[in-house]
Every structure is written in structure tokens, then in C-alpha cells.
Image (cartoon, grey):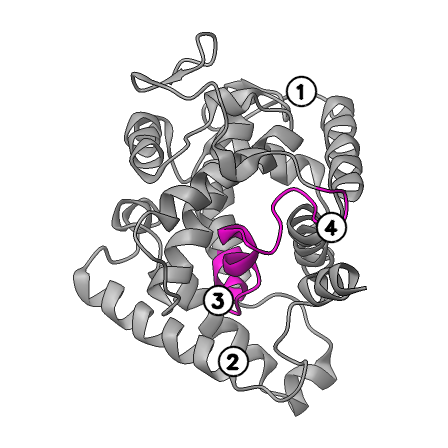
């Protein structure tokens, strides 16, 4: 991919697809007819979000920047909540809300100090376009793959449409949409190109292990199934990683692992879909529907 020329693996992607043409402020960046609304409002995103974090962490410089600039060790639930709020605002917020969230994130990234990744000795900046592109592509691939493998249905071409729509999200973090994959083929080409740079550091490995047992109040551990339920969710997310990524973590890269993870992901999604009332609904999506109906 050549960001300078606006071409991605030989294909011109300078112009955004018609599905991302400007909308009203109330509809936001995507609108209710988008694939993004459907995918991001699905219960499968609970697993997809964890999978995205595990995949993003196999880039040493991204992992180092994450470690140096967040309080996830002391407040992992707050970190997950803030990430969910970001995705909810960008997906379902008004255009003004999404643009404001993007401006705030870009300002925050610009203020963060550069660092050195200790195992490779490589310097990094949190707002480096190459690192932002990795985070974006890992998220898009994780959300789309997990949705499908959990039982979510997409018609022919809707996967490409989702990847293209998400270039609007990439723009908000400071990327030129012309430098971002616009279909599934380009997304897979990107992963093939970047794989030689990927490596699971000792820090990433420790964080993955901690992810199975994050801190919880003692009463929650003793009186609820939260601990084993969370471990099941993280284990499923890890099993849904690409085989090459699982091998980087030292996890099995076998077809049987894929099958087990998919069966579990489908069961988790069905259980969440059966929750009564609004328990299983995405609150940001529900608010957007009320806003458009009003």
C-alpha cells in the first residue's frame, strides 16, 4: 500500500464508495442502512472486541505504546468501557459527535511522548500512521470475522462494503482513507505484507495471560459466574484469532481449535440474543434509533 500515491496494492482507492457519501448529522457517519450498524450492534462484538485487542498486541510497537500510555493494568474494565464508548459514538453517534470524538483522540495521540520498544529497540510514536493503520485493520478484520464465525449473516459483497465503510473510522483517527484497504482482498493483502513485522513480546504474552483473570471484587468472584464466564470469552476470542497469530502466542494453530472456537462463539451469541428485553441491546444503537425516530 502506498499512502503517498493513494493506491492500495495496485488499485486506485482515492474516492470513497458511494455508501460513505455525506449523511445528515442525525444519521451520523454510516446510517441505519449500513453494514457497520448491523455488525457493530450484534452481540458477537463482545467477543470481537477482545479478539481485536489480542490481535493488535502482536505488533510490538503498538503493544509498547498501549502499555506506556494506558491504565489498563489498574483499570481493565474502564479501558474496555472507553473503547466500547468510542466504537459506539463513531458508529451510532451524530456526525458532530463522531467528528468531535475523532478530534479529541487525535489531540490526545499528538500529546503522547515517543518511546522505545525494549525488546526490539525500535522507536515509535503513537500517532505514527503505520501503527494507526495496523490498529484499524486489526479491528476491522476482527469485527467482521467474528461476526461471521459467530453466525452473523452477510450477503455477497457486504463484507467488502463493511471494510469500505470503516475507512470513515480510519479518517477520524488521522489516516488518509485512500491509504486504507477498501475491500476484503486489500485487507488480506495488507496482513500478508505486515506479517514480517509482527512478534509477540514478553509484555504482550503477560498481558494475554492476565486477560484470562482480570481483577474483580471478591464478592463478584464468589457469588457470580463472572470469572469463568470471562475466561471462556477470552479463550473463545483467542481461538478465533488467525492461525498465524495463535502460533505467535504459542497457542495451537490447528483446524480443531477453529472449530471449537466457532461453536462456542455461536453458542455465546445465541445466548445473548435470547436475553430478555433490552439486556442484549447495544445502548448506543438504541439511542440512535430513538433519535432518528423522533
Give coordinates of residue 233: x percent, y percent.
48, 70
Give coordinates of residue 194: x percent, y percent.
35, 27
Give coordinates of residue 221: x percent, y percent.
65, 83
Q: Nearer the viewer, mark 3 or mark 1?
A: 3
Secondary structure of residue under mark 4: loop
Q: CA distance from mark 2 to mark 3?
A: 9 Å
Residue at horizontal 65 percent and vertical 67 percent from the top:
282
Above or below — where is 19 with respect to 242? above
In the displayed structure image, the side of residue 245 where residue 93 appears, left or right: right
Secondary structure of residue under mark 3: loop
In the displayed structure image, the side of residue 238 where residue 82 appears, left or right: right
CB contact under 8 Å: marks 4 and 2? no
> Image quarter for residue 20?
top right
Residue at horizontal 25 percent and vertical 58 percent from the top:
252
How dense is the environment of label 1, judged by Cα within 10 Å: few (below 14), some, or many (20 and up)?
some
Label placed on residue 114 = 1
Residue at horizontal 34 percent and vertical 29 percent from the top:
190
In front of the other: 51 or 40:
40
Give coordinates of residue 269: x percent, y percent.
46, 75
Q: CA distance from mark 3 to mark 4?
A: 20 Å
Above or below — where is 172 with respect to 290? above
Image quarter hosting the C terminus: bottom right
Magenta stretch bounds? 24-50
Q: For mark 3, what is the residue?
A: 44
Is 283 included in the stretch rendered in magenta? Answer: no
The answer to which of marks 4 and 2 sits earlier in the sequence is: 4
Q: CA distance from mark 1 to mark 2?
A: 43 Å
Q: For mark 2, what is the residue?
A: 273
Q: For mark 4, what is the residue?
A: 93
Amino acid at each position: 500500500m502506498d499512502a503517498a500515491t493513494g493506491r492500495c496494492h495496485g488499485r486506485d482507492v482515492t474516492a470513497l464508495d458511494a455508501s460513505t457519501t455525506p449523511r445528515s448529522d442525525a444519521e451520523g457517519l454510516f446510517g441505519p442502512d449500513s453494514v457497520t450498524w448491523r455488525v457493530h450492534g450484534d452481540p458477537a462484538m463482545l467477543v470481537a472486541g477482545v479478539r481485536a485487542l489480542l490481535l493488535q498486541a502482536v505488533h510490538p510497537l503498538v503493544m509498547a505504546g498501549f502499555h506506556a500510555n494506558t491504565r489498563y493494568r489498574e483499570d481493565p474494565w474502564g479501558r474496555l468501557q472507553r473503547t466500547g464508548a468510542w466504537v459506539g459514538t463513531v458508529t451510532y453517534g451524530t456526525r458532530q459527535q463522531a467528528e468531535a470524538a475523532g478530534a479529541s483522540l487525535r489531540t490526545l495521540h499528538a500529546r503522547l511522548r515517543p518511546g522505545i520498544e525494549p525488546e526490539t529497540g525500535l522507536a515509535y510514536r503513537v500517532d505514527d500512521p503505520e501503527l494507526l493503520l495496523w490498529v484499524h485493520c486489526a479491528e476491522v478484520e476482527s469485527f467482521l470475522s467474528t461476526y461471521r464465525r459467530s453466525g452473523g449473516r452477510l450477503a455477497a459483497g457486504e463484507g467488502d462494503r463493511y471494510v469500505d465503510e470503516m475507512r470513515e473510522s480510519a479518517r477520524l483517527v488521522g489516516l488518509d482513507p485512500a491509504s486504507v484497504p477498501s475491500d476484503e482482498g486489500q485487507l488480506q493483502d495488507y496482513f500478508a505484507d505486515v506479517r514480517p513485522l509482527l512478534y509477540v513480546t514478553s509484555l504482550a504474552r503477560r498481558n494475554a495471560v492476565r486477560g484470562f483473570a482480570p481483577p474483580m471484587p471478591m464478592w463478584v468472584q464468589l457469588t457470580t459466574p463472572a470469572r469463568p464466564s470471562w475466561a471462556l470469552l477470552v479463550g473463545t476470542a483467542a481461538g478465533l484469532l488467525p492461525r498465524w497469530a495463535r502460533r505467535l502466542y504459542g497457542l495451537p494453530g490447528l483446524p480443531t481449535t477453529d472449530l471449537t472456537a466457532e461453536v462456542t462463539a455461536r453458542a455465546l451469541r445465541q445466548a445473548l440474543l435470547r436475553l430478555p428485553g433490552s439486556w442484549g441491546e447495544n445502548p448506543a444503537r438504541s439511542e440512535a434509533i430513538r433519535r432518528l425516530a423522533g
